[in-house]
Image: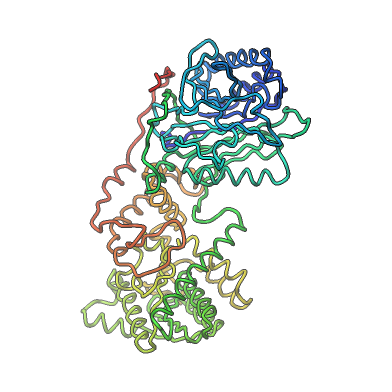
Amino acid sequence: MNYGFIRAAACTPEIIVADCDHNARQILELMKHCVDQEVNLAVFPELCLTGATCGDLFTQQVLLETAEKALAQLAAASAALDLISVVGTPLRHNGKLYNCAAVLYHGQVLGIVPKRLIQIDSASDEGRYFSAAPEKNDSAVCCGETVPFGSRLLFACEEMPAFIFSTEIGEESWTPVSHLPHPVTAGAAVIANLSAGAEIVGKSAFRRQLVQSQSARFSCGYIYADAGYGESTTDLVFSGHNLIAENGVLISEAEPFGSGVCIAELDLEHLTNERQKKSSFPAQDRTDFQLIRFSMNVEISKLTRPLRKNPFIPADEQALQDRCRDILAIQIAGLRKRLAHVHADSLVIGVSGGLDSTLALLVCVKTMQDAGRPNTDIIAVTMPSFGTSRRTKRNAVTLCRAFGVTLREIDITRSVRSHFRDLGHDEMNHDVLFENAQARERTQVLMDICHQHNGFVVGTGDLSELALGWATYNGDHMSMYGVNASVPKTLVRDLVRYYAAHLAEPRTAKVLLDILATPVSPELLPAQAGKMTQLTESIIGPYELHDFFLYYLIRRSFTPQKTLWLAEQAFAGSYISEEIQRLLKLFLKRFFANQFKRSCLPDGPKVGSVSLSPRGDWRMPSDAAAAAWLADLEKKEEPKPNEKKKYRRIAAS
């Protein structure tokens, strides 16, 4: 299966101006290279068959005839290639000359798309040679055949309904003049842009921004093929700066004056899901468009695009620092507003020496600083019991003293034992009751301290725990404002690390680093020799896997089977496939079984693209069944026959 992916390429051939035979050979070599790389759709630059800088040679019959002959040769050569190629060429039609994109596949010209927007500026005088595309679609004679001709052509794959692409040339997409209807409103998920933009200082950054913004604006895949080496340098230089973007993210780039080839997979299922979620995205209307269908094997053997193990964490260090700064700012602003609204005299927080409560305490401290209030208005409560280790208790106390907050230590062991006696529960029975009684006792203590000091409880639980239901109902599950509610566990680590590196005093930073090095544990089972015995990730599995599942199942709305396939590739060498599948099943079971805990979550700020708040981002019945998702995970791919399928062009509709 291909799980909704196609592989696309933007290619810049090394041309000779006006030498169409040479240029066709160079284009064909790149087409063959793309086939070797299992590319489905290859896009070449504007007028690459002749060169975009031919000037008045475009008025010469010799050039136009040799261009059409070279295009016919390319089309014939494509018969042996499982690749759709979009090639820039001039074409005469009805007494006019047009700057066109020719779509070639399996020995045929599927369609010709003329350029709509003809430039006349200091760098281009297209209007001297070319006419703008007619308003309505038509048919034209090209390479001895009558083919669809017009600016409103869509090309659709029979085997993958989401694989619909359109073409545009040059600045058509980002001109301030509207060219409605736009092909994306007719269902195009991919836009192939054939361009010949000269390189000047600062242009590459501007080009990246444009391509990314267009792909974000239309929730589409955007393939930008730029003219490069071989174009005339009489007055201008062309760099072959090729780009592929998906939904606002640049996923592949051929740097200016580089190789001239970039290849990447576009996730059409992701794009379809994004459009479906946007109420502002219009319903498909193909009234003004002609659909040209084709048949193609769209399977790919592996992904070449970057696939990060931690999708919530930017790969770039500066981007990560920026994200951490922004998240802390959002958390602090949310808590400060709530503090002012309820006129609280204090913030009450349980501090365990673990990651989540540490991050929540850091947010409380910065909130008080921003509000101009003393840290003593923060009441940090450490509540040791059976499972508390010496290390976590020491770190909790040291951190609170470093910040100068009001620290209270309340050992809950005696209270919990009294509760066990009331229930007739054997203390040696370390069951769920044994664990949850401690969590609920701690919450009761925090709530009652609020009444003593006119405060409110700041929650510490994170997004990953909420997804897994790894919280005691009406215990640590409950607070009056949950500052970490939409921060996944993998990102909690980076937020604490960011604070240690950029905001903390050296003494405080040392404690924070030791907390980062401490294994994650609820510390509800008895410690041995002062050391923790209960390690969360040895019970429910690594949080890096669960956060991966959370992102792709919830944010991307992917099937469990596709999520498993992606995880197998992202974590190859770290976990075996069977272990990933086992933990994905565990995630699904826990996610569905624990919705009732999320249905009554306290308020908390949304900081990223994934939130499980029942008031906004995630509304799910508490008694929904997981059976269909678990069954999807068990589906097996049917073996494919070895014989080569005969692909065909299907009549336009």
Task: Find residue 563 and report its horizontal and vertical position in percent.
Answer: 41, 45
Name the residue located 36 percent from the left edge and 64 percent from the top edge: 470
Q: Is residue 76 left or right of residue 280?
A: right
Q: Could you say which is closer to the camera, residue 424 or residue 42? A: 42
Q: Is residue 23 left or right of residue 183?
A: right
Name the residue located 39 percent from the left edge and 19 percent from the top edge: 651
Q: Could you say which is closer to the camera, residue 428 or residue 362? A: 362
Q: Is residue 108 left or right of residue 161?
A: right
Q: Is residue 505 visible?
A: yes
Please tell me in which quadrant of the rendered image residue 172 appears: top right
Task: Find residue 625 and report its horizontal and vertical position in percent.
Answer: 25, 51
Q: Is residue 535 visible?
A: no
How many numbered marks does the figure carry? 0
Task: Find residue 200 and report its horizontal and vertical position in percent.
Answer: 72, 41
Q: Residue furthest top?
A: 144
Image quarter of the C terminus: top left
Q: Residue furthest bottom?
A: 452
Q: Is residue 111 above or below residue 619?
A: above
Name the residue located 21 percent from the left edge and 79 percent from the top edge: 423
Q: Residue furthest right?
A: 234
Image quarter of the N terminus: top left
Q: Could you say which is closer to the camera, residue 211 or residue 429? A: 211
Q: Is residue 343 above or below residue 357?
A: below
Please tell me in which quadrant of the rendered image residue 119 appears: top right
Q: Is residue 318 above or below residue 47?
A: below
Task: Find residue 40 and report its horizontal and vertical position in percent.
Answer: 50, 28
Q: Could you say which is closer to the camera, residue 433 or residue 602? A: 602
Q: How is the image coloured?
A: rainbow
